[in-house]
DNA sequence: TCAAAAGTGTTCGAATTACACCCATGG
DNA sequence: CCATGGGTGTAATTCGAACACTTTTGA
């Protein structure tokens, strides 16, 4: 195969911002970097792209390899390529965010991998430009989640309204009026109320709901106005 | 300097979707690809990243080199990296869109470069995956322009309301009610009406306006509801 | 005088906001 | 029986949608 002559070839990596929710708090998953440079410091999940992988495939592989997570929501949100962002060699990184239900994978992540969840507001200093990537990821899920029901990816199949509201409040760092929140969500027509209650959070218990995935995309999801009161 | 061993280094390119507006129609700028493979076919503006450029710098350099355009609005909107998107060698491309006022650069582009404007609805078949990149760019400016006043980058300093409306209608491929459009735009408080009229489009003439750049970001720009009637 | 584009208001219904009390239950 | 969190309603206002005629002026 002929090649393009005289051009610089560069290392290309994937970095993954993994958002998780445990029913109460929004968190992100970090690992202690296992190799130099910056070995032992907190880092996003990352890895290099293999020769024959697409970007999406690479992101899925890296996630599987570092956390055992498979089949989770993953979305690309940009590329980061300042010449000296890695001290060892130039690396251009394509950034993804993942959304997962923490409880679903709790034991797995603790036991098999050395990953740790951090509250979104208590993230330590990260290696290289990972803090910048994280900020961009937060911005991205905020703009996306105002118009698309992606945050349900962070919840179990059965969830309660208080959990859902905690989640939205966590993502946007704001308080939402509970009555208006419920009215808006139910009016979109994407929630199915179950008989069963979750008694873990209160004495009265909160009804479980599921997301009605049927015709989900056809329903106009827009909760822009509930945020930034 | 030490290097990361045993990892594949890949060609990284920039591809630029250049949107332009001439007061009536939304267009994009294409060039005939000057080298193999696919020489002679229509292509987005692209080029390889140099060793010491950031991604934004590379995008600006490539734009300057291929079109003479400098200092225009440029925004990254993603990376494209299917293993065989270029037939010759694997290339990962970081995609940008640019917004420019066609009339400002008209002669320059025709004379010095072999670039051509195409109506947004009459774009020819493009090389490789450039059609896919173009679709993503259209999607991106639609979502961004509903919430941010970026489309003013496509207009000259002085513009008329009918031009502005043509532009929004072009970007969203929709018709907008003129009275509601005016009311909404003026209520945001970002337009300054001038004395002067543009007589080129009609006998009556249309008043020129300028964008009030002061406190622009503080004003909540949201015209979501005017679109997709 | 007329054709062609610019400019302007009003009404109606829907959606958003603001706000506070009752409910159910386990301890 | 009471503390805790869950669940619900209403009124005032704002906002969005729909709709048509008058103005200006060059040809």
Image (spheres, coloured by chain):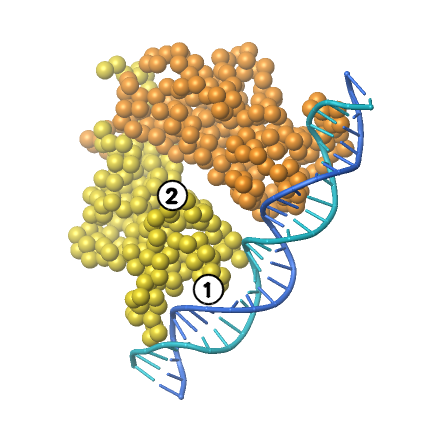
Chain colours: A orange, B yellow, C blue, D cyan
Residue at the spot 22% in from the left edge and 39% down from the top edge: B61
Q: Is residue B185 left or right of residue B42?
A: right
Number of numbered tags placed on the structure image? 2
Residue A99 lies left or right of residue A179; in this view the side is left
Rendered view: B35 above or below A166:
below
Q: Considering the numbered disc 1 on the image, is that residue within a helix, a strand or a loop?
A: helix
Q: Is residue B135 in sight in this rendering?
A: no
* B178 left or right of B45 in image: right
Question: In which quadrant is the C terminus of chain A drawn?
Answer: top right
- Tell me the subunit letter for badge 2: B
Q: Earlier in the sequence, mark 2 or mark 1?
A: 2
| Residue at numbered disc 2 | B133
Which quadrant holds residue B111?
bottom left
Q: Is residue B201 above or below residue A6?
A: below
Residue B62: x percent and y percent?
A: 24, 41
- At horizontal 51% and vertical 26% (from top left) the residue drawn is A19
- Secondary element under disc 2, as helix, strand or loop, is helix
Look at the image and tell me whether residue A197 can be seen. yes
Circle 1 chain: B
Between D21 and A194, which is closer to the camera in this rendering? D21
Q: CA distance from mark 2 to mark 1?
A: 32 Å
Quarter holding residue B58: top left
- In the image, A203 versus A134, the foreground residue is A203
Q: Residue at x 59, y 33 (%)?
A: A152
Which mark is in front, 2 or 1? 1
Q: Which of the two residues, B27 or B144, is positioned nearer the viewer here? A: B144
The image position of residue A144, as x and y in percent, is 49, 39
**Is the N terminus of chain A in the top left, top right, bottom left or bottom right quadrant?**
top left
* Residue B170: % across, % down: 40, 57
- Quick check: B145 left or right of B72? right
Residue matched to label 1:
B178
């Amino acid at each position: 195969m002929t090649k393009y002559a005289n051009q610089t070839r560069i290392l290309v990596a994937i970095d993954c911002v993994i958002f998780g929710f445990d029913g109460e708090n929004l968190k992100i998953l970090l690992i202690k970097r296992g190799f130099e440079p910056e070995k032992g410091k907190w880092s996003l999940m990352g890895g290099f792209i293999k020769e024959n992988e697409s970007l999406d495939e690479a992101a899925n592989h890296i996630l599987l390899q570092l956390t055992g997570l498979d089949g989770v929501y993953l979305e690309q949100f940009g590329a980061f390529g300042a010449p000296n962002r890695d001290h060892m060699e130039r690396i251009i990184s394509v950034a993804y965010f993942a959304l997962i239900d923490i409880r679903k994978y709790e034991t797995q992540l603790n036991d098999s991998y050395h990953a740790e969840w951090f509250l979104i507001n208590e993230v330590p200093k990260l290696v290289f430009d990972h803090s910048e990537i994280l900020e961009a990821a937060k911005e991205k899920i905020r703009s996306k989640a105002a118009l698309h029901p992606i945050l349900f990816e962070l919840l179990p199949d059965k969830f309660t309204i208080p959990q859902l509201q905690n989640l939205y409040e966590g993502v946007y760092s704001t308080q939402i009026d509970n009555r208006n929140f419920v009215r808006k969500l139910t009016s979109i027509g994407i929630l199915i109320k179950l008989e069963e209650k979750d008694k873990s959070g209160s004495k009265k218990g909160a009804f479980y709901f599921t997301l009605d995935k049927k015709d989900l995309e056809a329903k106009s999801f827009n909760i822009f106005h509930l945020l930034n009161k």
